[in-house]
Amino acid sequence: MNPRRSLFIGDVHGCSESLAALLEALAFDPAQDRLLLTGDAFTKGPDPVGVWRQIRSSGAEMVLGNHDAKTLAILEAFLKTGRPDFEHPAHAELLERILPIGGELLPWLRRLPLVIDEARFCLVHAGVNPERGLAGSSRDELLAIRTWPPRKGIYGPRWHEAYRPAADGKALVFGHDAPGGLVRRHRADGTPYLVGLDTGCVYGGELTAWILEEDRIVQVAGQKAIETGPPVASG
């Protein structure tokens, strides 16, 4: 399919109502549009099963996020041993919610790529090593990079402050960084080279989409989280 539009959506985090509202605001047509997600689809929010149903029905593509990797590990461990093994109390609630769909969700999670790299864009969950680029980025960086130089915690100078646009003309699209909020950077000729879409939907922010062909942002309100999280940057 040659899509009419390429629609990128930031971290959904179990907010099925926000996802439905955003798809409606976008006038999403699965027969004509391509839908791509930045990862972290199911954790923290109120309705991971509802998010899964929308992913399945829309044909959405997604890169693996750090929370998706944790969801995968929790599911695999429980289905293998029958015993819960949680690092966080919220994981118990997540497991209870997703077990009914575990049989179909598990193989899908296993197939998720770390990167979707194409002619017009490169999609990752968290970002890339700003000095080594995509090819020199580790799995951990693709899943969880925030600050540069790396530091403990979630605050500090962002990796993309040290990032320079790739010579290939692609837009690098990422999520993961709710405290950092929406990120949009353009080349001198006006073409986008960096788009960050995690605007803290599950923390009381917005769920954000970017339309590649129009270089346009569309947002809807987020939902209440199951677990608390970092404050979202204003502006």
Image (cartoon, rainbow, N blue to C red):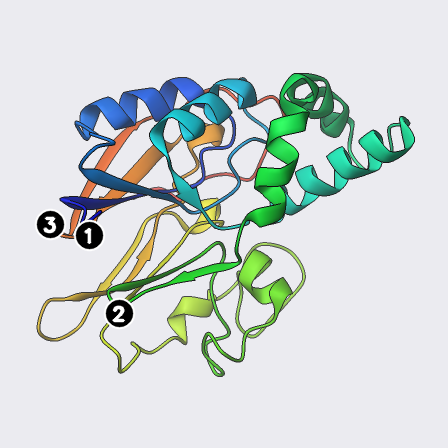
Query: Residue sitting at 46 percent across and 44 percent down?
Result: 178
Of callouts 3 and 2, the N-terminal one: 2
Q: Is residue 220 above or below residue 144?
A: above
Q: Work out how far the residue at label 3 is from the one at label 1, CA to CA, in angstroms.
A: 6 Å
Q: Quadrant of residue 119?
A: bottom left
Q: Do the residues labelled 3 and 1 touch (CB within 8 Å)?
A: yes
Image quarter (top left, top right, bottom left or bottom right) of the C terminus = top left
Q: How many marks do you count on the picture?
A: 3
Residue corresponding to mark 3: 214
Give the residue type that dot 3 points to: Glu
Q: Which amino acid does label 2 sit on?
A: Lys
Q: Which residue is drawn at 71% across and 20% down?
A: 93
Task: Choose between 102 and 210: the one closer to the eye.
Answer: 102
Q: Residues within 10 Å of mark 2 (few under 14, many from 20)?
A: some
The reply to whether callout 1 and callout 2 are in contact (CB within 8 Å) is no
Q: What element carries label 3?
A: loop
Q: Can residue 65 be seen in this view?
A: no
Q: Nearer the viewer, residue 85 or 120?
A: 120
Residue placed under numbered mark 2 in the picture = 170
User: Is residue 109 visible from the viewing direction of this image?
Assistant: yes
Identify the residue at image location x=29%, y=21%.
21
Q: Quadrant of residue 186?
A: bottom left
Residue 212 circle label: 1
In the image, 235 versus 78, the foreground residue is 78
Residue 47 lies, with reference to residue 14, above or below; the image says above
Residue 40 located left or right of residue 70 = left
Q: What residue type is labelled 1?
A: Leu
Q: Where is residue 132 in the image (x, y as percent from the top left)?
A: 49, 83
